[in-house]
Image (cartoon, grey):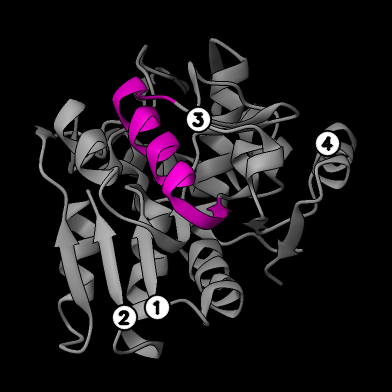
Amino acid sequence: MKRTKSSRQTQILAELDSSPSLRVAELARRLAVSTETIRRDLDELTTQGLLNRTYGGAVRPLSSEPSVTERHRLFVDERQRMARAALKVIGDGHVLMIGSGATTVHVARRIAVEMKNITVITHSFGVATVLAFNPTIKVLMLPGDYHASEGATVGVHTVSFLSNFYADYAITGASGLAADGPSEALLECGAVYTAMVARAAKCVVVADQSKFDAIFPSRYAPWRDVDALVTDAAPPDKLAAALRQSGVELVVAG
């Protein structure tokens, strides 16, 4: 099956996460494309700051999860499909809490198109911005310290403010999806997601297949506190078993 450019570039980054460096010829063989295609991909990813070019290949810079701006460029088609699938799960909601991240912005964009006369509580400026296109949606922006790389407010004021509200659904992304629950690379955002899950009747996690079996510092909820996982591929066996055991609805966006 032919890969989209975004999924191919995401796979390149995943390959570099497991190897200190890779050669152009090796990447072309693994992804079944020409070396010219790989060179163009590496040039684009270098321009985006996601890797460093070397003679004949590339290396991944040492860093934590890329910024939300960088993540917006990856898995675009897949995120659009997941957003459409997520709306089928949350479409009956009247009050929503939405976490930060590239995938949740796609969900918010779909919400702005398909839903009306609802209230959205968020700490993400990206989410608030795309919802502004629908004047029937009331957006409540959470206070707090601004985290520039995530484009969101975080901290004790954000978490404390959430304690004043209830929601039908908490919609969160994740940096990693492991057998013991979804996790987040940023501790500050993980604390906000935990508070959202606690204040919502139901929790929906939306995350693509690149997050499978990845573990990050902040596990913000056990699977027993999650009602649905919306993703773009069937999860590996261990993760799938954990979801079934916890009664999590698995929605695979085809």
Question: Where is residue 186 drawn, in percent x and y?
Answer: 35, 24
Q: What element carries label 1?
A: loop
**Mark nearer the viewer, 4 or 2:** 2
Label 1 close to label 2 by CB (< 8 Å): yes
User: What residue is shown at x 53% (from left), y 14% (from top)?
Assistant: 21
**Mark nearer the viewer, 1 or 3:** 1
Q: What stretch is highlighted in magenta?
A: 185-206
Identify residue for label 1.
94
Residue type for callout 2: Ile
Q: What element carries label 2?
A: loop
User: What residue is shown at x 28% (from left), y 67% (from top)?
Assistant: 120
Quarter of the figure with residue 157: top left
Identify residue for label 3.
220
Disc 1 packing (10 Å; few <14; some 14–19; many ≥20): some
Question: Where is residue 20 drawn, in percent x and y?
Answer: 54, 10
Q: How far apart are marks 3 and 2 (CA)?
A: 26 Å
Question: Where is residue 9 drawn, in percent x and y?
Answer: 50, 45
Vertical position of residue 72 compared to residue 51: above or below = below
Identify residue for label 4.
242
Q: Distance between the residues labelled 4 and 2?
A: 33 Å
Identify residue for label 2.
118
